[in-house]
Amino acid sequence: MSNPVDLKAKVRALPAKPGVYLMKDRLGRIIYVGKANSLRKRVSSYFQPGRDRRVHPKIKALIETIADLDTIEVKSEPEALLLEGKLIKQWRPRYNTDFTDDKRFLLVRVDFAPELPRFALTRIRKDTRSRYFGPFAHSGLLRKTLAQMRRQFGVLLGDASPRKLPDGTWQLYDDVRQELYAQTNVVTTADYRARVEAACAFLDGKSREWLGRLRTEMTSAAAKQAFEKAAELRDLILALEGTLARTRRFERDRTLLRPDQEALDALQLALRLPAPPRHMECFDISHISGTYVVASMVHFTDGRPDKDHYRRFQIRSFIGNDDFKAMEEVVGRRYRRLAEEGKLLPDLVVIDGGRGQIAAALKAFIAIGVEPPALIGLAKKQETIIFPDQRAPLNLPLRHPGLNLLQRLRDEAHRFANTYNADLRSRKLRESILDDFAGLGPVRRAALLEHFSGLDRLRAATEAQLQEVEGIGPKLAAALHAFLHQAPPAGALPA
């Protein structure tokens, strides 16, 4: 680390050539990067006597923090301009960031905390919970863009005063102004937030389009040796790139930290639940023409799969093809057990199916004497929500976040049931090879499969291990061992 005398000597020794200078603090951290047509002239200007009385407070603070500096010589000022931008982007020095984020340009801020997010103009980043777009250099064009966006997407700007109606919906504008906009004036919270997402995508596209235009303008200004203009455009580009990067982080964090909170809130509103359904369970029945009938139950916590609570069932109460009986059985088994263990029921139970399946599930709750939680069916043909009471079926918009969450839940239950069905069918098909071995009745065949937990371990067993099963003597064990290890017929698939 240099002392002030060394620093002044280093400044006097700088060449009168183009380049980039890097200011460092006492810990050796780069705190500012600048460019110069003459390094000696530009850097020495920071240390002129009496300068601190004339400079901006931020620059004064920078000068007081400088403890050392490095320089990089280049061939021309345009090269210095490009290198300066590259190093600022690489090091993100404290004072460059302060200057870049100065209050010269407008930002668009969207705060997602309120029930109805609004779009407002600001020159300061107030928090990390909001999403920002910009900066935008031309305020007039930006205001026109927001006005266009309000008409096109039906979103609120900062001056709006929406009114909540008795049924929980919102009237966005008064009766006179609503005729100015293309979208409906009365909306649910979920519908409005879908509009906000569409408007954000529009602004994001505008930002990227603006970024491309700025880069073209900066290159043109540098070619004309209008370096001050090029530097200003370069700063704006860096600020806009920073905003776009923050936007990506914001979206990622919103997904990681509150993955489906908006969907849960929207579902609560659509289904008139007392609270967002943090714990949801969904049932699905799977079979092939009435054979290998199985059921699945998947559990979502806070809108995400919670696989520790997944369950799968084989149907015990009957043989054949009856989805309604199968649904009644597995729902009853699931919630009888939870009740006996004193565990909480989920906030919402979803049945894959229509009126018949939902009636079967309700019958199961009545049979076990358990008060059902919120219960709905989801009929796949029209994605219709069926209620167990007298409420009319509900069809939500296909992009409704609550419906999309129900679809993910239902599709996961369907996948889990089909996987179990396929596993069971494969196991049964492989085990059917024992039907070809003479001398094994159903009792001893079942005993073997139960003892070895399937055909694979049975096939790997020695003759001595086979004799450990009741009813399997030395002669039968030897014959069975030879049968299980014989070569398959030509063209046959392996069992």
Image (spheres, grey):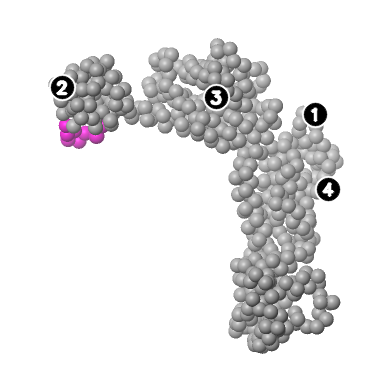
* Residue 474: numbered disc: 2
Left or right, residue 249 beside residue 140: left
* Residue 291, image x, y percentages: 38, 21
Q: CA distance from mark 2 to mark 4?
A: 90 Å
- Is the residue marked by circle 3 packed among few (<14), some (14-19), or many (20+) residues within 10 Å? many
332 relative position to 493: left or right: right
Residue at x 70%, y 51% (from the top left corner): 128
Q: Which residue is the site of mark 3?
A: 351
Q: Is residue 447 above or below residue 58?
A: above
Residue marked by disc 4: 159
| Disc with the residue nearer the chain's start (2 vs 3) | 3
**Pointer 1: what residue?**
166
Residue 395 in view here: yes
On-image quarter of the C terminus: top left
User: Measured from the top left, where is residue 249 in percent x and y?
Assistant: 62, 53
- Give amino acid for label 1: Pro
Q: Nearer the viewer, residue 286 or 80?
A: 80
